[in-house]
Image (cartoon, rainbow, N blue to C red):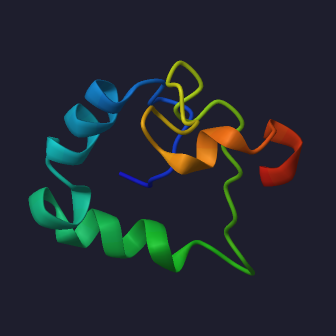
Amino acid sequence: NCIPTDSAFTFSQLREIQSASKLCETNPEEARRLLQSIRGYLVLIPHKFLSKEYLGPRLPAKEILAPAWFWT
């Protein structure tokens, strides 16, 4: 259960993923075997993580007064 992931488009989906059982808890031997097969660096770049959520400031936050380009 690697987070962030492209499987979570909303916060409710993220909570479901976080509550799912982890391989290291259900089958530690299999988890260890999979980890030993990794060589180099493992980097996952999710492009759609929380894509259906509004992550901007909400009222009455003072940050809403600044333009969006200020934060990117």
* Res. 72 visible in picture: no
Res 49 quadrant in image = top right
Left/right placement of residue 37 relative to residue 10 reads: right
Please indicate whether residue 33 sits to the left or right of residue 18 in the image: right
What residue do we see at 52% from left, 42% from top? 5
Say which of 50 and 17 sits in front: 50
**Outermost residue, top side:** 52
The foreground one among 32 and 56 is 56
Q: Nearer the viewer, residue 44 or 35?
A: 44
Q: Position of residue 68 (x, y in %)?
A: 80, 38
List x then y, in percent, for residue 25. Answer: 12, 64
Question: For residue 47, what is the image quadrant?
Answer: top right
Name the residue rendered at 70%, 64% in the picture. Answer: 43
Count of marks, rendered view: 0
Q: Residue at x 70, y 79 (%)?
A: 39
Residue beneath the point at 29% across and 63% down: 30
Q: Is 68 on the left-hand or right-hand side of 1?
A: right
- Asked if one can make out residue 11 in the rendered structure from this viewpoint, the answer is yes
User: Could you say where residue 56 lies in the image, as x and y percent from the top left?
Assistant: 58, 36
Residue 57 lies, with reference to residue 30, above or below; the image says above
Q: Residue furthest right?
A: 69
Please state the horizontal and vertical placement of residue 46, each as a whole percent of the image.
66, 43
